[in-house]
Image (cartoon, rainbow, N blue to C red):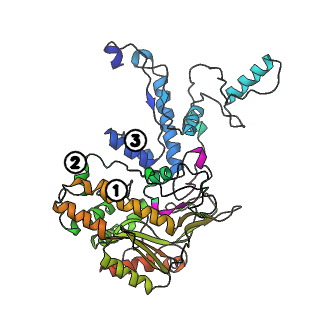
Amino acid sequence: KRCREYGITCPVLPGIMPIQSYLSFKRMTEYCGVSVPPEVMERVESVKDDDEAVKEIGCDIAAEMCELILNTPEEDGGVDGVHFYTLNLERSVTRILIMMDAIEHSASGVPAEMTSASEEHAKEQGNESKVDWSVGVDPPVTGRMRSVSISKARLPPTRKQLPWRPSALESRSKEDVRPINWANRPKSYVMRTDDWDEFPNGRWGDCSSPAFGELSDVSHFYNFSLGSEEDRRAMLGTNPTRPSDVYEVFARYVENKLPHLPWCETPLQPESYLIQTQLAALNRAGFLTINSQPPVNGAPSTHSTFGWGGAGGYVYQKSYCECFVSPENANKLVAMVTDNPSLNLYAVNISGRELRVGAEEGGITALTWGVFPNREILQPTIFDPKAFLVWAEEAFSLWTSLWLNLYDFDSPSFELVETIRDTYYLVAIIDNDYMASTNGCGVGGGGSLWNALLAVGGVDNDGGDAATTKT
C-alpha cells in the first residue's frame, strides 16, 4: 500500500519463508534484526524441542499469512500472489498449498488437480494412461487460491526421526549414522562428506572406505560466522590475559549468556539446563567442554527431551564428554580412567601426540541406540577413533580461525590463546556403564563419569544432577 502511495506501480510479491526449525528461526530473526509478534513466538516456543511440530506450526503460520495477504483488497494493499523461499525444502510449501486448498491431496501423493488435468489431457489424446506432470509438463493453472480452514488439513505430528537433524538432501535420505564429534557443527560434517558416493545406513563401518570418500579433506572446512570482529571480541574477550579469562567464556556459554562458541553453532541444548551450575564450574576449572551427553537407559522413545525414532520404542545412550584440557589435567584424566574399567579415553594434541586408555585399536563404539517395534536396532550416533582424529584437526584450527586472529601478533592475548591451542589436548571420554549411571533405568543421576570429572577438577558436586548433553 505504501509503495502505491509513493507511485511504485510494478508488481509486488511478498516473500514467504516457512519456519523449518526453531534454531534456524531464531538465528534468522536475530541476524536480520526483526521483531517477532509475541503470538507467533509463543506458538513456536511451545513446540521448540520437537522438529516436526515446529515445521507444522511454521506451515500453519505461513498459510495464515498467505490467506490474509491474498484475501486483502487491492486498495488496502492486497497483491496478486506470493513467492515462496523453499530453500530446497519443498515439502513444507506443498503442505502449505494443501492447507490453503490451493491444491488437493490425492492418495497417490500427486496434487489431485494435476492428476485430474492429466486424465483430461489423456482422454483428449485418446489415451487413458496418465501423463506424468512431474517431468517437465506444466499442469494447468486453476486460478487464485481459495480460502479454507487451516485446521482441516493439519498433518499428524511426529517426534524427531533421529537424535540429530537429518539432511534434506535427497542423496542423504538413507543416512542414519553419524559420528558424535560434529554434533554441534553439523553443516561442517555435511560439507566434508558432500562428495561421498554412499552414506552410512544401519551401521557406521569403516570411514576410510572408498565408497565413503575422504572425511579428512580440509577443503570442506566450514566456518559459520560469529559476527563482525567487534562482535567476536565482545563474545570471546576484548583483551584476555589469563587462562581463567578463556575459561570464563566457555562457562558463560554454558550459562546461556553467550549464543555460540567456535565449536558450537547453536545455544546450549535444553537437556543441559538441569546441570548448568555443574557444567559452569567444570569449565571454570579448565575443562572446556564442547560436546557431551548424559547416560540414558531405556527411556521411552516419546520422552520429551531424549525421545526420537517414533512411538513404541526405547532409547539408550552412554555418557560422553569431549573437552580441551591442559597437559596437567590430561594426565589426571588418564589416571582417572585407568582406575575405572568402565571408562575409555582418547586424546590428541595439535602436534598429533595421542593418549589412549582402555581403547582397542580401530574400535568403534555405539553411543546412542534405540529399539522399536518391527525394526532392527538403530544406532545413529557412534564414536570412531579415526573420525575423532579428523575432527581434532578441525577443532584445533578453530582456535586460530575464529579466536586467535582477533588479537595483534605477540600481544598478551595472542600469546594466551596460542599457548592453549598449542599445548592443550582434546580429550574424549566414554562411560560404557550406562546402566549404573542411570540407577538401572530411564534417565537420571549424573553417573560415575560426571562425578569423577568434577572430582578431578576439584569441583564440589552440590548435589545437583551431574549429567550433561550436547554442550
Q: Can you identify the residue that label 1 sits on? A: 262
Point out the tag, 2 or 3, that comes first from the N-terminus.
3
Identify which amino acid the numbered label 3 is placed on: Glu
Q: How far from the left and from the top, in percent, is residue 160?
A: 55, 54
* Number of marks: 3
Judge left or right: residue 166 versus residue 17: right
Taking the magenta stretch, the answer to whether it contains residue 59 is no
The quarter holding residue 178 reads: bottom right
Q: Are marks 2 and 3 in contact (CB under 8 Å)?
A: no
Q: Can you identify the residue that label 2 sits on? A: 230
Point out the tag, 1 or 3, that comes first from the N-terminus.
3
- Image point 33% across, 43% down: which residue? 30
- Image point 61% across, 50% down: which residue? 197
Local SS, label 2: helix
Identify which amino acid the numbered label 2 is placed on: Glu
Instruction: Name the mark nearer the viewer: 1 or 3.
Output: 1
Judge left or right: residue 457 versus residue 138: left
Taking the magenta stretch, the answer to whether it contains residue 164 is yes
Q: How far from the left and from the top, in percent, is residue 241?
A: 17, 64
Identify which amino acid the numbered label 1 is placed on: Pro
Q: Can you identify the residue that label 3 sits on? A: 39
| Residues shaded magenta | 156-181
Local SS, label 3: helix
Instruction: Name the mark nearer the viewer: 2 or 3.
Output: 2
Identify the image quadrant of the C terminus.
Answer: bottom left
Q: Nearer the viewer, residue 301 or 360?
A: 360
Judge left or right: residue 258 versus residue 69: left
Distance Cα–Cα, label 2 vs label 3: 33 Å
